[in-house]
Image (tube, helix red, strand yellow):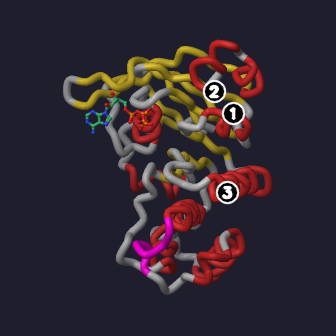
């Protein structure tokens, strides 16, 4: 579904990605773990076209997408939920969700998707006329995921969905992430600081360190790897 080949990216003179290669197969949840500043968010931003790459290649369903303007990717089925949610605080919940379907013209199906998203997140339905900025952190994360679902993604890039949220809410959000993957078959590339949570959720994982991949394996193997346990799982 998705492949990054030897991707390099920089912020001015800071080289953030130094040759990242990742493969994500249809229907998988793949996690990227690593310390602060390892390059996880940068990898997602490069994939979604928000950040230009210096060299390397990015393929989505076999088609090269590096250099494609970011707004062209959701209509193709590739959608990012950015770190820190980035919902529109002065727009209502309804309006935020509608923006996720900005390019679609199939009104009846859009209406059906509103109901699906409100079915997944009933709290958002209760708050549908409320401004996004007045929602709690967890509700904003739900709204950001809901907005992405309104584009009917085939691949979802999720950046730190647990960031700043209480454990109970995090669990709820991860249950829904799993549900989206199993019931819709949506492929997910997940970035998480919380390596435990990420590896419990994912099938495979990549470990990033200072812009490079230092290890890749099945998630359960990474979880049992003593080096990973020591460095990332708090042992
Ligand atoms: P975190 O979980 O803290 O977001 P991360 O693994 O997602 O970590 P990135 O945010 O991708 O890491 O950062 C990778 C590197 O790029 C870091 O060295 C960071 O300081 C640098 N960087 C990120 N954003 C910028 C920016 N806008 N300008 C300059 N350097 C940046």
Please tell me whether mark 2 sits on a helix, a strand or a loop: loop
What whole-number distance in Å separates the C-alpha atoms at marks 2 and 1? 10 Å
Q: Position of residue 174 (x, y in %)?
A: 68, 51
Distance (Cα) linking label 1 and label 3: 18 Å
Query: With 167 as the anchor, is 159 left or right in this view?
Result: left
Q: Is 69 positioned to the left or the right of 75 in the image?
A: left
From mark 3 to mark 2, how far is it between C-alphas? Answer: 20 Å
User: 10 Å neighbourhood of mark 3: few (<14), some, or many (≥20)?
Assistant: few
Determine whether 103 is above or below 191 in the image: below
Residue 143 image position (x, y, % from top left): 54, 67
Residue 109 can be seen, yes or no = no
| Residues under numbered marks 2 and 1 in contact, where contact means CB atoms less than 8 Å apart | yes
Count of numbered marks: 3
* Residue identifier under label 1: 199
- Relative to 99, residue 3 above or below: above
**Label 2 packing within 10 angstroms: few (<14), some (14-19), many (20+):** some
Q: Magenta segment range? A: 131-136
**Residue drawn at point x = 61 percent, y = 28 percent:** 23
Which element is circle 1 on? helix
Image region (quadrant) for ligand 1: top left
Q: Earlier in the sequence, mark 2 or mark 1?
A: 1
Classify the position of the C terminus by image quarter. Answer: top right
Can you identify the residue that label 3 sits on?
Answer: 168
Residue lying at the far left in this picture: please name it: 12
Q: Which residue in the protein does label 2 denote?
A: 233
Image coordinates for residue 170, horizontal then vertical, percent:
63, 53
**Residue most extreme to the front:** 235
Q: Which mark is residue 127?
A: none
């Amino acid at each position: 579904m998705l492949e990054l080949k030897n991707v390099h990216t920089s912020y001015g003179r800071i080289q953030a990605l130094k040759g990242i290669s990742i493969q994500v197969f249809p229907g998988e949840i793949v996690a990227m773990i690593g310390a602060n500043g390892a390059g996880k968010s940068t990898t997602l931003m490069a994939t979604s076209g928000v950040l230009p790459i210096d060299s390397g290649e990015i393929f989505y369903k076999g088609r090269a997408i590096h250099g494609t303007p970011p707004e062209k990717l959701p209509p193709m089925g590739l959608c990012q939920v950015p770190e820190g949610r980035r919902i529109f605080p002065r727009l209502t919940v309804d309006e935020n969700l509608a923006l996720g379907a900005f390019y679609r013209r199939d009104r009846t199906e859009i209406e059906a998707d509103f109901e699906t998203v409100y079915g997944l997140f009933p709290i958002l339905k209760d708050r549908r006329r409320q401004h996004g900025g007045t929602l709690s952190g967890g509700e904003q994360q739900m709204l950001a995921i809901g907005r992405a679902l309104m584009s009917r993604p085939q691949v979802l890039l999720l950046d730190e969905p647990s960031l700043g949220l209480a454990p109970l809410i995090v669990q709820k959000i991860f249950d829904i992430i799993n549900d989206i993957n199993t019931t819709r078959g949506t492929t997910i590339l997940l970035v998480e600081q919380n390596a435990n949570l990420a590896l419990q959720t994912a099938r495979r994982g990549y470990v990033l360190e200072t812009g490079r991949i230092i290890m890749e394996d099945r998630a359960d193997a990474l979880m049992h790897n003593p080096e990973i346990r020591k460095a990332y799982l708090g042992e």
